[in-house]
Image (spheres, grey):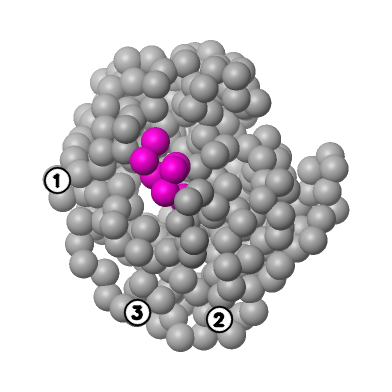
Amino acid sequence: MQVLKTPESAFSKIVDFPYSPQYVHVTDTVSSEIAMAYYQAGPKDGHTILLMHGEPTWAYLYRKMMPVLADAGFNVLVPDLIGFGRSDKPKRREDYTYARHVIWVKEWFNQVVKGPVTLFCQDWGGLLGLRLVADMPERFAGVMVSNTGLPTGDQTPSDAFIKWRRFSQDVPVFPTSSIIQGATVTELSQQTLDAYDAPFPEEEHKAGARIFPLLVPASSDNPEAQANRNAWESLKQFGAPFMTAFGDSDPVTAGGDRIFQKLIPGCQGIEHVTIKGGGHFIQEDKGEELAELLKRFIKNTHSL
């Protein structure tokens, strides 16, 4: 597997993400080891919160939430998915599969995360993070989801997703920061836009970002459709606290919160919220509010 590495100099102008990357090596059953980056904030002996990003973002997306949670005494861990941020980037699109990403994330999790953990996930962070929860439910003290899902391909995707998938494949130059701005309610500064472009200095670095929309199970014969059905069967038995906090301005995942609330036992008795003014990349629009909700969720439901 040919792997690209974004030079550290590409991140040199980012001034609002002061976290130093740490690295572990992960592998799957086919490829050689590749480096996966992650960031830690707060006391390491605090209760662990895992923040998982989606596509085409990286851990920078959580810069508004990390200090709030760290200051509250939590051990905050935020990985860069393979192909994103400071993590290694396989050059060929064919090297990215949903199954491989699950393996990579699970390997990272088993190496880095100790003790019980609360997961917050959005976008592909949910498609991957919820597979961890389904596979290792005993490791998770609670889950909070926002603007995500765990599709099996048995339901027709939204028009917004179909348009996004077509755009992602047809656009000659993949406009990373413009995509994020287009799915965010607030106006992002040029500094912020540059930070989202930083991991991708050349078009060849964007293979993962390009292929991710095609990996979402949008039909019942998708290679990971059955694995996600199996994951749902596990999640239907998940009784730990489970909260939804979806934005009111995300056409891609609208209504997805109700599916979680209906099917997952841990959703019962939880005060679920719809966040006003929250676009798809809700961490940009309402990061501090999300962090406060997460703090309250843990305080009210976890026995720490």
x then y, percent, for residue 89 = 67, 61
Decide if residue 122 is on the left or right side of residue 209.
Answer: left
For the residues labelled 3 and 1, say whether their Cβ atoms are less than 8 Å apart: no
Element type where label 3 sits in the image: helix
Q: Amino acid at mark 1?
A: Lys
* Vertical side of 13 occupied by 130: above or below: above
Q: CA distance from mark 3 to mark 1?
A: 25 Å
Q: Amino acid at mark 3?
A: Gln
Element type where label 1 sits in the image: loop
State the residue in front, 16 or 41: 16
| Magenta-highlighted residues | 162-168
Q: Residues within 10 Å of mark 1 (few under 14, many from 20)?
A: few
- Residue 114 in the magenta stretch? The answer is no
The picture quadrant where one finds residue 207 is: bottom right
Residue drawn at x 52%, y 34% as measured from the top left: 216
Q: Residues within 10 Å of mark 3 (few under 14, many from 20)?
A: few
Q: Amino acid at mark 2?
A: Ala
What residue would you read off at disc 2? 10
Residue drawn at x 21%, y 67% as measured from the top left: 187
What residue would you read off at disc 1? 276
State the residue in front, 244 or 172: 172
Which label's residue is closer to the chain start, 3 or 2? 2
Residue drawn at x 37%, y 58% as measured from the top left: 179
Which mark, by number, is residue 191? 3
Q: Is residue 106 something one can see in this rendering? A: no
